[in-house]
Image (spheres, helix red, strand yellow):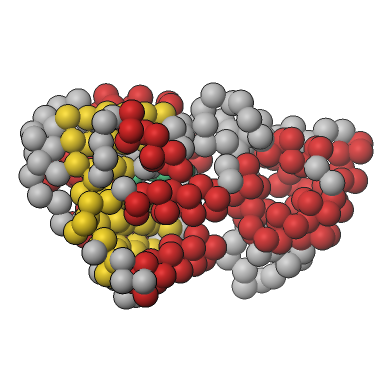
Amino acid sequence: MDRHISVLLHEATDGLALNEGATVFEGTVGLGGHSRILCEKIGKTGFFVGTDADQDSLTIAEERLKDLPCKKLFVCDNFRNIDTVLAGANVESVDAILLDIGLSNRQLEVAPRGFSFMRDEPLLMTFRSSGEGLTAREIVNEWAEESIADIIYGYGEERYSRRIAKAIVEAREIEPIETSGQLAEIVKQCVPKFGFSKIHPATKTFQALRIAVNDELGALREGLAKGFAHLAPGGRMAVISFHSLEDRIVKEFFRQKAQEGEGTLVTKKPIVPSDSEVKENPKSRSSKLRIIIKN
Ligand SMILES: C[S@@+](CC[C@H](N)C(=O)[O-])C[C@H]1O[C@@H](n2cnc3c(N)ncnc32)[C@H](O)[C@@H]1O
């Protein structure tokens, strides 16, 4: 099912205060949920430039947005390369930027890339559908125990990181860890089950590996800096994040721009989903939206 329920859809797209004819960059097109509203707002004279690291998602989005009259350009790239993408489109500055980071439901539930500990799939965890580059399989089977522990702790904030890394190394000595199911089983044995914990014991480890494979925090830092540099004065940038590590980076970056007099915060506190949105889409519960205007 190629479906993804867009998070904070109206809060993010309204927050960009787009006018007819605007140029907008969306770094995380996914299945085009936010893109549709953005394209509607900029009308037939607007220009929409969208990237996603995942070509399969981008192809679906492009097809879904065909009916919208604005000029559109879809580029399969990491949003950290916004500078070269815009240069390739002959665009110097944009009126708005939207990043809705993380992964889509399609990537979690349809594309067999091992993102979910609830399924038994090849252990890739790449946003890229092409399959090249670093994979989670490589990390768990080839990296040193200490490096594995460091990423599980640093990106997963998992207190049992050392125990999990040790178990991974012991397991791979018997046979390679090829699937998400195998990995989830190993992790489950290391994390004590607390009666009150609502999350699956492998949640933090899987999050950590995904962040490492895709260098998500590095991409976010680079995308924020380059994106802000390419915003026109008065232009807005909106970022939706899904966990504290990401939100901290966005918060700090925006705060610094405001302190330096380069930006004005639209959201002093992040916008979070309403109770009804969380009820309808429980996956939205950890999302946070921050918006800044370039002075
Ligand atoms: C939460 S989904 C976006 C959903 C989209 N807003 C919608 O409404 O359909 C995040 C998307 O961003 C992509 N992505 C995540 N990090 C990226 C990056 N650094 N560069 C390019 N795409 C990225 C993922 O491949 C995924 O398709």
Q: Residue at x 10, y 41 (%)?
A: 21
Q: How many marks?
A: 0
Residue at the image position 74 percent from the left and 35 percent from the top: 138
Q: In which quarter of the view is residue 195 placed? A: bottom right
* Residue 182 point in image, percent of width and height: 75, 40
Instruction: Depth check: give the residue in front, 145 or 251.
Output: 251
Position in image of residue 266 (x %, y %): 25, 69
In the foreground, 275 or 246: 246
Q: Is residue 7 above or below residue 94?
A: below
Q: In terms of image quadrants, where is residue 239?
A: bottom left
Is 227 drawn above or below residue 130 in the view shown? below
Q: Is residue 2 visible?
A: no
Ligand 1 sits in quadrant: top left
Determine whether, in the image, residue 50 is placed left or right of residue 213: left
Classify the position of the C terminus by image quarter: bottom left
- The one nearer the camera, 81 or 31, is 81
Q: Is residue 231 visible?
A: yes
State whether residue 249 is above or below residue 44.
below
Q: Is residue 220 above or below residue 138?
A: below
